[in-house]
Amino acid sequence: MNGRIEPTKANLIRLRREAAFAQEGLAILDRKREILLRELSLLAQECDQQRAKLRETIGRLSGETAKILASLGPRAAAYETIPIQGSMVIRRGEKRVMGVRLPVLSIERIALPNHPLAPQLDEIAGELERVMPELLSYVTTVCSMRRLAAETAKTQKREKAIEEIHLPGYRREISKIGSALDENEREELVRCKSLKRRLSADTRS
């Protein structure tokens, strides 16, 4: 609230109404923050479980792949590790939590290249293909957590602004205007009494 506000009853009513709206907004933001934190906590637990499972699976597949490549010899291993493009079609969607857009991703189709010199690698690729939906789910969870964390931080910032700046400002202005109106009322009462005394004196004379 910048500038001087005239101490009128209309302004006092307006400021009281705005302060009430700000208080209601603070309550809404507090509730929103609680919901966001709850969702963030649930996703954090899910993320930990997904990470542990993927670390175990991918670590095992990586170890088996290294053993197979080592058994092939340098030339065959070099050939099998030449990057060959596969394909993956991802279906994209979204859901909203307290206005935050969270990604919803799923694999519609996936095709990984074959390995003619090492059929054992095809078995590894098959397992990797089966684990890809879990990996995509993990990526989705991490992305959702980042968006929820960012929105939670913004919500907390808005709460702090209302709590520490706007509401105290309204209270100060309401107090100042209330005091000014009370003072004006007392002065008016004094003037009325003084006028009444003069009128009474004039009547007696």
Image (cartoon, grey):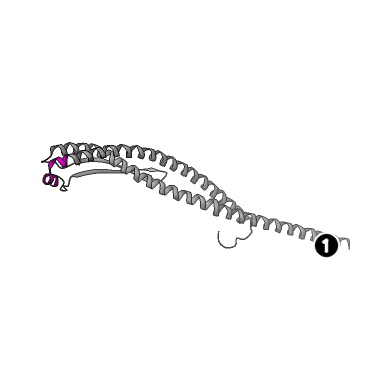
Q: In the figure, residue 191 lies in which quadrant?
A: bottom right
Bin the neighbour count of mark 1 within 10 Å (Cα to Cα): few under 14, some 14-19, many 20 and up. Answer: few
Please tell me which residue is depicted at 77% across the width and 59% down the height of the picture.
190
- Residue reaching furthest right? 205
* Residue 14 shows in this picture: no
Q: Residue flagged by tag 1: what amino acid is it?
A: Arg
Q: Is residue 76 magenta?
A: yes
Q: Nearer the viewer, residue 105 or 8?
A: 105
Q: Quadrant of the N terminus?
A: bottom right
Toward the viewer: 27 or 20? 27
User: Residue 132: image x %, image y %?
Assistant: 25, 40
Query: Is residue 144 visible in the rendered structure shown here?
Result: yes
Side (left or right) of 145 relative to 20: left
Q: Quadrant of the C terminus?
A: bottom right
Q: Secondary structure at mark 1?
A: helix
Q: Which residue is mark 1?
A: 198
Magenta stretch contains residue 143: no
x and y, in percent, of residue 134 in the image: 28, 38
Report x, y in % for residue 42.
40, 38
* Numbered circles on residues, count: 1
Q: Looking at this view, is 52 or 163 the one in front?
A: 52
Q: Quadrant of residue 49?
A: top left
Q: Position of residue 137 (x, y in %)?
A: 30, 40
Residue occupying image coordinates x 29% and y 39% = 55
Residue 21 position (above or below residue 200): above
What secondary structure characterizes most of the magenta part?
Answer: helix
Residue stretch in magenta: 68-78
